[in-house]
Each structure stands twice: as structure tokens, then as C-alpha cells.
Image: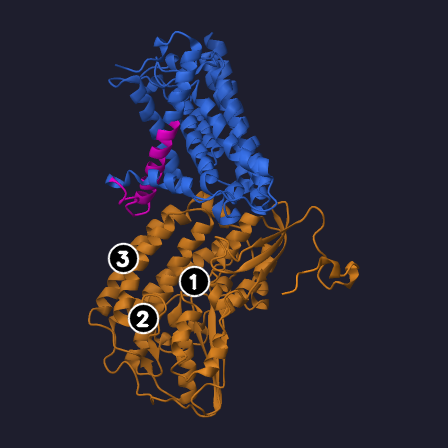
Chain colours: A blue, B orange
């Protein structure tokens, strides 16, 4: 039996059950992703990765989590108490909302919204606020530099990201992720990512930058800013940032799968499985990139966005509009 | 201890002899002594305007261990193990510089086999130092993986050196008149196998890492230094060879049997971080060439000359310079005829190379400063001694 959220009649019941499912999904996938990241990193680096805790080191993330929960929550002297603790919560909370409009399966969309895409983009934009608060509130110069970088990076990369998403929305004629997914087919040539590879590429690059992953992990750039905005965070304060990063990765991968890779659609397997396969394919790509490339410099990062990605995205959008106009 | 009273500070700023402090929009940032990319306990005081560096000032002395003073308290032999701890990444070269200076002072001749073994182990050690630098530098630039590959290669090399010397990092293998013990039977074939292995790996490193567009963007045109600047600060080793001057002690003042070997001194004229990077990558091949020549016709005979158990060199002084992985290492020993050195002066190449940093970092971004610092290949214990 495939999971079916539509069997709940009242939309509020659907929302609450959906939210609970989202929490479970984020928590579980966060843990799995930590293990996958460490294991893939290990194999990329000629070492086995986590090995001893559980079979294939599968329980390693749980041990990590227990360690993080058990640690003292330290706060530096002179830090702004409220901002300092608000930041990790603010990093994590908006991400969970982003999962609500995601169509995991035809019957498994916690909240069908005709502006679902806007909701996701709006709430993922909130994430940068938490980085600013963390950097500012922790009264640390490295944190401040990291926060300053986060702002510039977020502003620079949201523009091409929105333009790339818009070109898909115009093609589909909808902002509802469910609608956009169902307009694509199960085979690769029916996907928007194949029909419009430029937008897909721009979206992927921007997604990596938006989630602050290497090679665009400048706000936390370990070798330059020690740990950037989360330098002063310990225990679960750091843990929430960590979890938020992984949750963000899942969100952008989910959006990418829905927008460009046909979402739940695919032959033979059930919808949710296809969706997860596509999400994890993108996640693995992001992990692979992180452990392969050096970090770009800050001005190079901004140049890439303003001089290359934004103009390309505008051209792509213009082409999409023209083709749509001709095609009727 | 008396509490620090701010009221006692002079109120008139002109009475303070410090340089003018930061203006309102400048940020003073203390990078280190605990910072992931200062590789140890170097501290750099940065004055930042946004992310641009207005002033960079290295602060030294966090790992000053008074090696030179220790030399005066010990006999010539007893000081030998200290040399492996000055620069733990190229311990053999420091061994050699000290042993060479004392041999010159006492007039001890090293047999041919001893010289060949010295050349081979020093070059092996140079490769291990360069490999570690390569991994650590890329770590500074945010690439996590290359250091694992570098360590994979380095492991083979350390196994060879362990079989010879008994230790894996802080070697104390040289003795006055040669080396402590002869190399094992399989030393030469193992060295040849290693150089073959490394040569097969270098093209992969070039394709995967050196030619990467992000790496090039982070290295090319960063920290440009012309040869005059390098000379003014006394920079040596790969740092000055990256500025276009092919200065190498092995060629300029040939010591030991280096004159017999055929090898190339790589030099690049760009003077940026990439040039220094390329010099080191080429030196890996150079060292492989030298090792091949040194071990493939290892002369027979003793590996060490007979030296008296309690060495008492005649009154006088002697210098000995060798080419370390970081530049010209020079040891100056002065004897008053007793069993202990009267004075030992260690010239660490890293100290001069670091002093260029203030000039190179000015006006660059913080990320570039990290790249420049990494490209100078600093070992802090060597700088502080």
C-alpha cells in the first residue's frame, strides 16, 4: 500500500500529519546523509570511512548526535544572549516548512499550494538571516566575517536561482510543484532538466552556493575563517546548524528533482522511491563535488554569479518565453 | 599578581610609541596561534579593511625551544637528536648541516658510500616534505582529498626510511663521518620502486589537482614577488626559484657528491603562488632523479668514517650549508677546543621566507593571504628554533 495523505479529509489534519512526517523525514534523512557523506568522503579519500559503530558504521551518526546533545552549550562572553540562541533555531525551523509543498508522491504532498515554489524560495531565503544573527550575536570577528560573506553570497546567488526556477515555472505555466511535476513524464527526455539543461545547470550551481557547500562554503571556510559564522557554537547549537545544512541540501535536491527530473515519475518503481532516488542522486553529486574541489575565492564567487550565471539565466529565461510565445 | 588597571594607561596618544592604531572602519584580527591554516603556532596580526589586508605582521616565538642554547650545554654528539626536531619535516637536511659543519671543523672525511646514502635519504625526506606541503596547501585552499593521496605515497617512503633509520619523522640518522648504520639489503630496489611509483602518480596529480581551474584561480597572480624582493628578504629554496632565480645550494655550492649527479634545478619566473607550487611539484621529479642515480650505483665500503667517541674539535669555526626542502639551511659551529660547542648558529630558511609575507599579503584578500602563507611552505618550529 502506498502512503496516502489524501485519505485525511480535513486540510488541517493533513497539514499536522504532514508536518510530523516532515520532521521524521528530515531527522532520519539527516542521519542517513551524515553517514553517506562520511562514507563517500572516506572512499573518495582512499579510506573506509566509519566502520566500527554498527554494521558498515551505520550507527555512527547516532553516536555523533548523542555526543552533540551531551555537550555543554557554551556561550562566549559579550555575546548577545537572545540572538545567539535564536540563530540555530532560526536556521532549522524555516527548512521544515520548505518540505511541506514538496510532492514526494502523487498522494503524498503534505500541502498542495498553487504558489508552493514561492513558499519554498521565501523560506529558504530566511536561512541566511540565521547566519547573520549567528555571526553578529556571537561577538566573534571570524563569525562576523563569515556572516558578511553569507549575506553577499546569498544575495548574489538568489538572483540566478530565481531566474532559473522562473524559466521552468513559465514552461509549466504554474508555480505549484505538484503541477510542474505532473507535466513532466517518467522518461528522461520528458524532463525539464533535459529539455532546458542550462536552467538545470544554473540551478545546481546556485543550489550548492545557497546551501553553503564546498566549493562555495565561504561563510564557514574552515581554513580561512576557522569555522565562520558557527565558530563559537558547541553542542546542539552547532548540531542544529549542521542539521539545517543537511535539511537544506535535501530541500534543494527535492526541488531540483521535482522541477527538473520529473519528481516522482518513473517506470516500474513506486513514486516515492523514484523521488528519493533522484534526490539522492543530486545529493551524491553535491557530496562528490565537496570532496573534490578546492574552495573558490570570494570575489571569484561573486564574479561567477553576476558575470556568468545571471546573464545566462536571463538569456535562458528570454529563450523560454520566446519559445513558449511561438508555441502558443 | 596585580590587576591590570586601565587608568594607568597614558591618556595622551602621542606618548605611545606604537604605530597608529586602526581607524574606525578597520578590524584588528589575530590569526593564530591556533588557526587551521597557520600550521602550528604562528600568529599573524592582521589589520583588515573589510576582507582586504592593510597590514600583516607575523608574531613569532610560540614554540621557541632554545635549540642554539641547548647546543652549548651538550656535547657535539648529544646535540645531534635536536636537529631532527628543528624542522621535523626535513630532518635529514638539518642532520646533514650540523654533521657537515662539525666534520669540517674536526677535519673528518666521509667515505663515498656514506655520502651516497646521505644523498638518498635526504632526497627521500625532501619528497616526503614536499608531499606533505602539497596536501596541507590544498587543505588551506579548501580541497580535503589530496592530502590523503599525498599521505598514501608518503607512507611507502616513511616505511623505507623507517627500515633505514628506525624512526619515521624526527630522524637522527647522521653521525660525524657518515651515517649511523648501513642501509638494509633491499634499500636500493625499494627506493627505485618508490620513484617509479611516484612518477606514475605525478601525472594524475597534475590532471586532477594542478590543472583544476579553481586551484589555478586561487594561485595564479597571488602573492607575486620579483626576484629583487626575494633577494632583499633573503628568501631561498622554492620561494626564490619561483621568482625566476635558479638558486640551489646543491648546484651553487656543491657539497658532498651532488656534483657527480645530473639533475635539473626547476625555476619559474612568474613569482606567484602557482610558480612556487610548480617548483615544488617539479622538485619531486628532480629528487626522484637524484635518488635513482644515488642508489643505482651505491659504492662498496664503510658507511661511516671512524670518529673519536668524545669529539673535541680544534679551536676555530666552520659553516656548512645544505639545500633543505624550504631553502638554504646553514649551520655555523664555533669551537673553543672543548667537548661542547662554544656557539652554534642555525640559519632557518623559513624565517627569511616568512618575512616576505608582510610585503606579499598587503592589499590582498584574507583568502589570498592564506594561499600565500601556504605557498611559502612554513614549518613554525624551524622558524622559532
Chain bearing mark 1: B
Q: Are marks 2 and 3 on the same chain?
A: yes
Chain bearing mark 2: B
Residue A293 position in % (x across, y down): 42, 43
Height in image: B36 above or below A80?
A: below
Residue A142 position in % (x across, y down): 56, 46
Q: Which mark is residue B296?
A: none
Magenta residues: mostly which secondary structure?
helix
Q: In terms of sequence position, does the residue under pointer 1 or pointer 3 come before the other?
A: 3
Task: Between residue B51 and residue A317, name the one nearer to us.
Answer: B51
| Count of numbered circles on the image | 3
Mark in front: 1 vs 3 = 3
Is B303 on the left or on the right of B271, as rendered?
left
Q: Which residue is mark 1?
A: B266
Is B9 on the left or on the right of A317, as rendered?
right
**Residue A40 sits in quarter:** top left
Q: Are marks 2 and 3 in contact (CB under 8 Å)?
A: no
- C-alpha gap between disc 1 and disc 3: 21 Å
Mark 2 burial class by Cα count in 10 Å: few <14, some 14-19, many 20+: many
Residues drawn in magenta: A26-54
Q: In terms of sequence position, does the residue under pointer 1 or pointer 2 come before the other?
A: 2
Chain bearing mark 3: B
Q: Are marks 1 and 3 in contact (CB under 8 Å)?
A: no
Quarter of the picture holding the N terminus of chain B:
bottom right
Task: Between residue B370 and residue B32, name the one nearer to us.
Answer: B32
Q: Residue at x 33, y 52 (%)?
A: B149
Height in image: A193 above or below A31?
A: above
Confirm whether residue A193 shows in the render: no
Q: Which residue is mark 3?
A: B197
Q: Is residue B197 magenta?
A: no
- Secondary structure at badge 2 equals helix
Q: Which residue is mark 2?
A: B120
Amino acid at each position: 500500500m502506498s502512503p496516502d495523505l489524501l485519505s485525511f479529509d480535513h486540510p488541517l489534519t493533513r497539514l499536522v500529519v504532514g508536518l510530523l512526517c516532515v520532521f521524521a523525514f528530515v531527522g532520519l534523512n539527516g542521519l542517513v546523509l551524515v553517514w553517506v557523506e562520511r562514507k563517500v568522503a572516506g572512499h573518495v579519500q582512499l579510506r573506509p570511512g566509519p566502520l566500527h559503530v554498527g554494521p558498515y558504521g551505520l550507527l555512527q551518526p547516532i553516536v555523533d548526535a548523542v555526543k552533540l546533545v551531551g555537550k555543554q552549550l557554551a556561550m562566549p562572553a559579550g555575546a548577545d544572549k537572545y540572538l545567539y540562541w535564536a540563530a540555530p533555531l532560526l536556521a532549522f525551523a524555516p527548512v521544515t516548512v520548505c518540505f511541506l509543498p514538496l510532492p514526494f508522491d502523487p498522494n503524498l504532498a503534505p500541502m498542495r499550494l498553487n504558489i508552493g515554489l514561492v513558499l519554498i524560495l521565501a523560506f529558504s531565503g530566511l536561512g541566511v538571516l540565521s547566519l547573520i544573527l549567528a555571526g553578529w550575536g556571537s561577538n566573534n570577528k571570524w563569525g562576523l566575517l563569515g556572516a558578511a560573506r553569507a549575506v553577499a553570497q546569498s544575495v548574489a546567488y538568489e538572483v540566478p536561482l530565481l531566474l532559473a526556477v522562473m524559466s521552468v515555472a513559465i514552461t509549466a505555466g504554474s508555480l505549484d510543484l505538484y503541477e510542474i511535476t505532473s507535466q513532466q513524464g517518467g522518461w528522461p527526455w520528458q524532463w525539464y532538466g533535459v529539455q532546458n539543461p542550462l536552467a538545470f545547470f544554473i540551478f545546481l550551481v546556485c543550489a550548492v552556493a545557497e546551501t553553503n557547500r564546498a566549493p562555495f562554503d565561504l561563510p564557514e571556510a574552515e581554513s580561512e575563517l576557522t569555522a565562520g559564522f558557527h565558530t563559537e557554537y558547541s553542542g546542539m547549537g552547532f548540531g542544529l546548524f549542521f542539521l539545517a545544512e543537511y535539511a537544506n541540501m535535501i530541500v534543494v535536491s527535492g526541488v531540483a528533482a521535482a522541477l527538473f527530473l520529473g519528481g516522482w515519475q518513473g517506470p516500474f518503481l513506486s513514486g516515492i522511491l523514484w523521488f528519493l532516488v533522484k534526490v539522492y542522486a543530486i545529493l551524491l553529486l553535491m557530496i562528490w563535488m565537496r570532496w573534490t574541489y578546492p574552495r573558490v575565492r570570494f570575489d571569484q564567487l561573486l564574479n561567477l554569479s553576476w558575470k556568468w550565471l545571471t546573464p545566462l539565466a536571463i538569456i535562458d529565461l528570454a529563450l523560454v518565453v520566446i519559445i513558449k510565445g511561438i508555441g502558443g | 599578581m596585580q590587576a591590570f588597571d586601565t587608568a594607568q594607561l597614558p591618556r595622551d596618544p602621542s606618548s605611545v610609541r606604537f604605530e597608529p592604531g586602526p581607524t574606525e572602519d578597520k578590524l584588528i584580527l589575530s590569526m593564530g596561534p591556533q588557526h587551521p591554516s597557520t600550521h602550528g603556532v604562528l600568529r599573524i596580526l592582521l589589520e583588515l579593511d573589510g576582507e582586504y589586508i592593510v597590514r600583516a605582521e607575523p608574531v613569532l616565538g610560540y614554540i621557541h625551544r632554545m635549540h642554539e642554547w641547548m647546543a652549548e650545554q651538550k656535547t657535539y654528539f648529544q646535540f645531534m637528536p635536536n636537529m631532527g626536531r628543528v624542522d621535523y619535516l626535513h630532518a635529514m637536511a638539518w642532520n646533514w648541516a650540523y654533521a657537515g659543519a662539525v666534520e669540517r671543523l674536526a677535519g673528518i672525511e666521509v667515505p663515498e658510500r656514506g655520502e651516497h646514502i646521505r644523498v638518498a635519504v635526504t632526497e627521500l625526506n625532501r619528497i616526503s616534505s614536499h608531499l606533505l606541503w602539497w596536501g596541507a596547501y590544498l587543505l588551506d585552499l579548501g580541497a580535503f582529498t589530496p592530502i590523503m593521496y599525498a599521505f598514501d605515497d608518503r607512507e611507502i617512503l616513511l616505511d623505507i626510511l623507517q627500515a633505514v633509520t628506525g624512526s619515521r619523522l624526527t630522524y637522527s640518522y647522521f653521525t660525524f663521518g657518515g651515517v649511523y648504520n648501513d642501509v638494509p639489503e633491499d634499500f636500493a630496489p625499494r627506493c627505485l620502486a618508490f620513484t617509479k611509483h611516484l612518477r606514475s602518480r605525478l601525472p594524475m596529480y597534475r590532471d586532477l589537482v594542478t590543472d583544476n581551474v579553481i586551484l589555478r584561480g586561487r594561485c595564479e597572480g597571488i602573492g607575486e614577488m620579483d626576484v629583487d624582493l626575494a633577494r632583499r628578504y633573503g628568501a631561498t629554496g622554492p620561494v626564490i626559484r619561483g621568482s625566476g632565480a635558479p638558486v640551489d645550494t646543491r648546484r651553487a655550492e656543491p657539497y658532498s657528491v651532488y656534483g657527480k649527479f645530473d639533475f635539473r634545478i626547476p625555476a619559474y619566473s612568474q613569482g606567484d603562488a602557482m610558480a612556487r607550487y610548480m617548483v615544488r611539484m617539479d622538485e619531486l621529479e628532480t629528487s626522484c632523479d637524484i635518488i635513482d642515480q644515488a642508489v643505482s650505483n651505491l659504492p662498496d665500503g664503510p658507511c661511516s668514517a671512524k670518529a673519536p667517541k668524545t669529539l673535541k674539535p680544534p679551536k676555530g669555526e666552520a659553516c656548512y650549508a645544505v639545500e633543505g626542502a624550504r631553502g638554504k639551511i646553514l649551520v655555523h659551529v664555533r669551537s673553543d677546543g672543548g667537548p661542547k660547542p662554544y656557539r652554534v648558529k642555525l640559519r632557518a630558511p623559513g624565517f627569511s621566507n616568512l618575512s616576505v609575507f608582510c610585503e606579499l599579503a598587503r592589499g590582498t584578500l584574507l583568502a589570498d593571504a592564506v594561499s600565500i602563507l601556504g605557498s611559502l611552505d612554513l614549518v613554525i618550529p624551524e622558524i622559532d628554533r
